Amino acid sequence: MQTEIIKIDFSRPLAPQVEACGKILARGGLVAFPTETVYGLGGNALDEGAAKKIYAAKGRPSDNPLIIHIAKPEDAEKYCHTSEAYYKIAEAFMPGPITVVLPKKDNIPASVTGGLSTVAVRCPAHPVARALIDAAGVPVAAPSANTSGRPSPTAAEHVIDDLCGKIEAIIDGGEAEIGLESTIVLPREGGVTVLRPGGITCEMLMEVFESVTLDGGITKKNESGAAPLAPGMKYRHYAPVATVFLIKDAGNADFDGRVTRFLARKLDREPRTGVICFDEYREAVNGKNVFYFGKKADDEEHAKRLFDILRKFDKTDAPEIYATASDTRGVGLAIYNRMLKASGFNILEI
Ligand code: TXA
Ligand code: MG
């Protein structure tokens, strides 16, 4: 299939630029598009056939449900049973990087929700995503626009690498602002459970809800064999080809000194060693496969750059990768969670 690539000109009105792509979605085709979190691979959420095409293009297991993207928070009424908690979330955080799991209505095909009785809904903030949903006139089912198992795409080039030739069109709207997928929450009696951490942080949710709990799978490996609440969280994700080790602060004095010496020794022995570390380590830690992903305290920059760096490793000869984790406050929890998955829970306490 010939994939058309549409570069958005933000100085011009968006609606005419995405009109043809809206028509592709309405008639059952697939279009990748930018959102504020990561790029999505969109298809008509009311069309069983479109959902099947999404799974096929990504090589995604069919038990891993899709998120439905809507233009306005109230549109959720048409596809699911909303609640007071939903409107609290909507008022505080929509449009924005948050997804809510709600009981589904019958018009959403089972193939979209992996057979679950619930559906995940999200109202994105990105102007191109919003213009596209409007142009389609249907809710847009959209997983991240990557081949299953690879890091989510934060730029159109990533989508082109994974999906060119497999879908009708890719809309290039530049780099994703956040760089990590949306926060997924499940409303429950008295509060919410976070199924996947993201740009809307637990601290932000705690300003709205009395009780905010974290699903166990976010920081721990699921060894019980129980089905995770967000099916996608069970898969090894974001994984470069090389083995990844996540370096964690064991709480001893002089963490930075110990880590930089450890990394410098590794690089001394094997100059191809891959590293993801803070800008502050630049002097002490360097090599051909060393990437710096922002100042130690700059979580937002780490979030923006992590997936692009993980993808870059697949074009290097690094036999092993060592990554330094941010602290787990704020958006740091989402970064830590994605790094844990990239490493297959391979933690190195230093
Ligand atoms: O930021 C995002 O959320 C991006 C952009 C494109 O919007 N989308 C995204 O979709 O990350 P995807 O498919 O890569 O991740 C969806 C996650 C999966 O872990 C899936 O298991 C979970 O959402 N999910 C979807 N429907 C669910 C449901 N009904 N109950 C629980 N988890 C659900
Ligand atoms: Mg994904």
Image: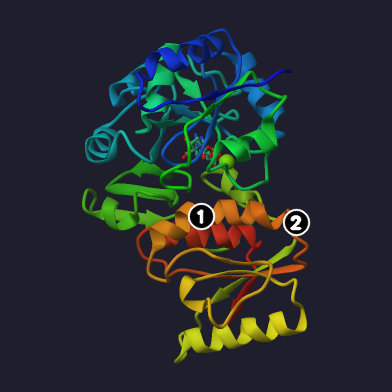
Asked whether residue 220 appears in the rendered view, the answer is yes
Secondary structure under tag 1 reads helix
Q: Is residue 30 above or below residue 190?
A: above
Closer to us: 137 or 160: 160
Give the residue type at disc 1.
Answer: Arg
Decide: marks 2, 1 in contact (CB < 8 A)? no
Q: Residue at x 70, y 56 (%)?
A: 240
| Numbered badge on residue 305 | 1
Residue 96, how many percent across, how many down? 33, 38
Quadrant of the rendered image containing residue 285: bottom right
Residue 157, how many percent across, how many down? 61, 38
Give the residue type at disc 2.
Answer: Val
Quarter of the N terminus within the rendering: top right
Quadrant of the rendered image containing residue 262: bottom right
Residue 110, how many percent across, how many down? 58, 22
Quarter of the C terminus within the rendering: bottom right
Asked whether residue 138 appears in the rendered view, the answer is no
Q: Residue at x 46, y 68 (%)?
A: 326
Q: Sequence-wise, which precedes: disc 2 or disc 1?
A: 2
Q: CA distance from mark 2 to mark 1?
A: 18 Å
Secondary structure under tag 2 reads loop
| Numbered badge on residue 241 | 2
